[in-house]
Amino acid sequence: MLTGEARGQVALFLLLTLLPFSVLAPLIGPFLDRFRHGRRWAIDSTMALLDTIVAAVTATVFTLPTVLLLSFVVGLCQQLGKLALDATIQEHVPGDRRTSVFGRSETLIQLSWVLGGGLAVALPVREDLGMTVLAALMLGWLVWVLRSSRARGRVRAAAVVT
């Protein structure tokens, strides 16, 4: 059972963590809706950036709290990315092909987990090296995500003009 002081601390924590989202979401959401796939792009880019930053911090300061933070952020971002992928598939793939596309996307996700585990086994047992490799891979992935979204935007704009 929580004491009065603990309840106050929990309430303050919830207020400080939820208040910015409850104030900013109604402002940011309509702005992102002006762009084609604006919310999905914002989710993907933000999650890739957050993963990259936390991986770099963990590579620099390898302690139990940073590893726990990295684990939490990677798990959260993976779930949000999967949610955005599922929404994209449901919105853009015809119903008769949806099952096949879901199966392929799940297979690629599982293969990426296997490749990541294989990389972890192949690296020497040095936490600074492992976290640095992770941060470098995440930075490469972030650049790829941002460049591919810009290229898709240019292709769509050219298709609309012609």
Image: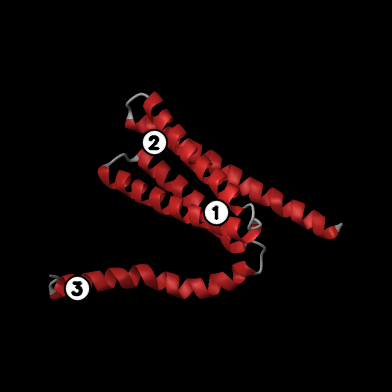
The CA span between labels 1 and 2 is 26 Å
Side (left or right) of 153 relative to 137: right
Residue to which mark 3 is pinned? 7
Query: Crowdedness of circle 1 by 10 Å Cα count: few (<14), some, many (20+)?
Result: some
Task: Identify which amino acid the numbered label 3 is placed on.
Answer: Arg
Please say whether residue 2 is visible from this viewpoint: yes
Q: Point out the frontmost of discs 3 and 1.
A: 1
- Which residue is painted at 50% across and 49% down in the image? 48
- Which residue is painted at 43% across and 29% down in the image? 119
The CA span between labels 2 and 3 is 37 Å
Which of the two residues, 57 or 103, is positioned nearer the viewer here? 103
Q: Point out the frontmost of discs 1 and 2.
A: 1
Residue to which mark 1 is pinned? 85
| Local secondary structure at mark 1 | helix
| Local secondary structure at mark 2 | helix
Q: Position of residue 117 (x, y in %)?
A: 40, 33
Q: Earlier in the sequence, mark 2 or mark 3?
A: 3
Residue to which mark 2 is pinned? 131
